[in-house]
Image: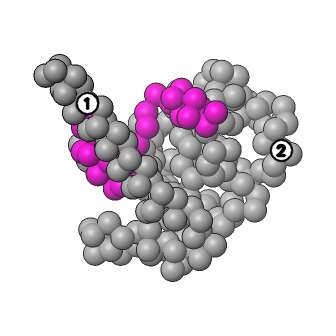
Amino acid sequence: VYRKVLEQGTLLLPDGYGLVLASHVLEGPIKERVTGVDFLLRIFKYAEENQFRCYVLLKSDGLTSPQQARSFFTREYPSLNILIESVTHNERESGYLIADIREHAPDILVVTFGAPLQERWLVRSMPKLPSVNVGFAVGGALDMIVGTVKRAPYAVRRVHLEWLWRLIQAPHRVERIFLAVVIFPLTVALLFLRSHFVYRKNVLAFMF
């Protein structure tokens, strides 16, 4: 079900380096990594320069409060037209939230509910928001931008060990990190072996 939601996305960013490696192993089209943090920073800068209206949705129990986010944007993007709201689970599913977004008519909508909720919410809600040209599901990227979560130092990012940095910072993420650094590579390896086996099998069938 979640895969079908992702397939409706117009732009899917390879935020993790493991996706790039998997792409090379499986002969896919991903050439380089694009981190959500760096991409989002460019979006905010572009929006400020071109006077686009932004609307940011925070989850009420998230790490970043509206006050922290507003303080950051006032300091770093003083000319950016941005509205920041924090909503509970019930408010996310209410008609009030959609009505409020429609009233403010943003060009860019940024959602930080976390996966897979944020992607599912965007897929359901975007058809109801005619002013929104771009909807971004950014997860914890905004926490790093604002500074409530410290981003891994450049040296750590350079050797692709952000997962270890995040695990040290947030041990409760161990299950998610295990899926990313153990289960996902094993799945890719199995896919590679399966495709290789099928290839050899077809060749042998042709030869005989």
Q: What range is drawn magenta here?
A: 1-29
- Count the numbered circles shown: 2
Residue 87, position as x, y percentages in the image: 77, 50
Disc with the residue nearer the chain's start (1 vs 2): 2
- Secondary structure beneath disc 2? helix
Q: Which residue is mark 1?
A: 201
Q: Nearer the viewer, residue 103 or 114?
A: 114
Residue 8, position as x, y percentages in the image: 53, 26
Name the residue rendered at 29%, 51% in the picture: 21
Q: Is residue 20 magenta?
A: yes
Q: Is residue 75 visible?
A: no
Mark 2 residue crowding within 10 angstroms, few (<14) / some (14–19) / many (20+): some
Q: Is residue 66 visible?
A: yes
Name the residue rendered at 45%, 62% in the picture: 182
Residue 125's place in the image compared with 81, above or below, is above
- Along the horizontal axis of the image, is 148 left or right of 165? right
Which residue is situated farthest in the front direction here? 208
Q: Which quadrant does the N terminus fall into? A: top right
- Place residue 31 in its image quadrant: top left
Residue 159's place in the image compared with 203, above or below, is below
Q: Amino acid at mark 2?
A: Glu
Q: Amino acid at mark 1?
A: Lys
- Secondary structure beneath disc 1? helix
Q: Which residue is mark 2?
A: 91
